[in-house]
Amino acid sequence: MRVLVVKTSSMGDVLHTLPALTDAFNCLPNITFDWVVEENFAQIPAWHFAVDNVIPVAIRRWRKNWFSKSIRQERHQFIKLLREREYDCIIDAQGLIKSAFLITRKALGTKHGLDRKSIKEPIASWFYDVKHNVPKSMHAIERVRLLFAKSLGYTLPEKIGNYAIARHFLTDLPLDHGQYLVFLHATTRPEKHWTENAWRDLIELVEPSGLKIKLPWGAPHEQSRANRLAEGFEHVEVLPKLSLSQVASVLAGAKAVVSVDTGLSHLTAALDRPNITLFGETDPKLIGGYGKNQFSIISPEQNMETISAKEVYQQLAEFI
């Protein structure tokens, strides 16, 4: 049985889909998956043992110059690749108009997705052959797990979902694995940031432990922040620019992680590493850390500035 998964972005949403694949494989051992995903996240599905073929798509890049000759050629090649085989089942786990119209609609096979009461953009459900009701009150991962169970006809397992990608990194851990912490300080929305003073206070509290702290970054302004956080501390290392796979290896070897609400926090959870995620305005009930040793510190005032370094260190001390 071959299934096409349409889950293109974001990083957290792609990671949230992995436990559903594990469920399906455990219930239907002969199943294999192809997966359409944004090119920037194409490494992630390949880490799961049940994924046979990753089909990168570049809607984010294409829309900047949609009608240029080169982009039209890329889109034509993508559709040609998408339609190379007919699938036993197509599961649109994205639930957006753009994914349903540009991808799911053009794939060959019976199309499954959320019904209009369950989906973020109800018009998207017009493009599905079979529509499923999944409560919006469930955690994002449990929603995808239930969608897969209903689409493929098995009973949703009662145990916690298994991302099943940690094993991919066990043979390539850093030499100093278990001897460092990772602080994920970067996120896209300003209200999700923790203050630089609070990060530096936490760095100072960690210093007597003898553990090194590693700071990854993705964009130049994030690198600048990392340099400011590390200034004056010998136990802090600002990492070089890394690929997503390289960042995953660093996270897989960490003793523990402290993070703001960001895609890499979900990657940490998927790698089964102890993780403390800080939340201000974001409600973690539906999208918070899911898995082993995932903890949340939530500001009662919905303001990141009210979370103290001492409060975070008290939680972190259980691991170090």
Image (cartoon, rainbow, N blue to C red):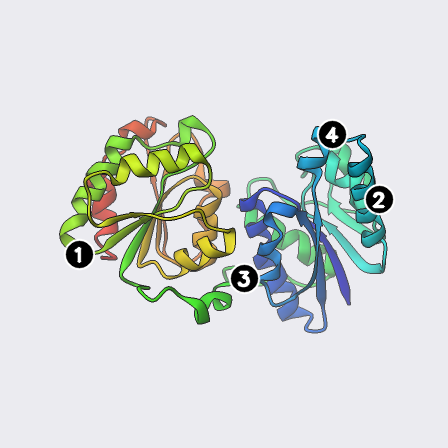
Q: Which residue is mark 4?
A: 65
**Image point 27% across, 61% down: which residue?**
179
- What's the residue type where badge 1 is placed? Gly
Q: Nearer the viewer, mark 2 or mark 3?
A: 2
| First in sequence: mark 4 vs mark 3 | 4
Image x and y of residue 318, in percent = 23, 55
Q: CA distance from mark 1 to mark 2?
A: 55 Å
Between 235 and 18, the residue placed more toward the observer is 235
| First in sequence: mark 2 vs mark 3 | 2
Identify the secondary structure beneath mark 4. helix
Q: CA distance from mark 3 to mark 1?
A: 41 Å
Identify the secondary structure beneath mark 2. helix
Q: CA distance from mark 1 to mark 4?
A: 51 Å
- What's the residue type where badge 2 is placed? His
Above or below: residue 315 compared with residue 200: below
Q: Which residue is mark 2?
A: 76
| First in sequence: mark 1 vs mark 4 | 4
- What's the residue type where badge 3 is placed? Glu
- What's the residue type where badge 4 is placed? Asn
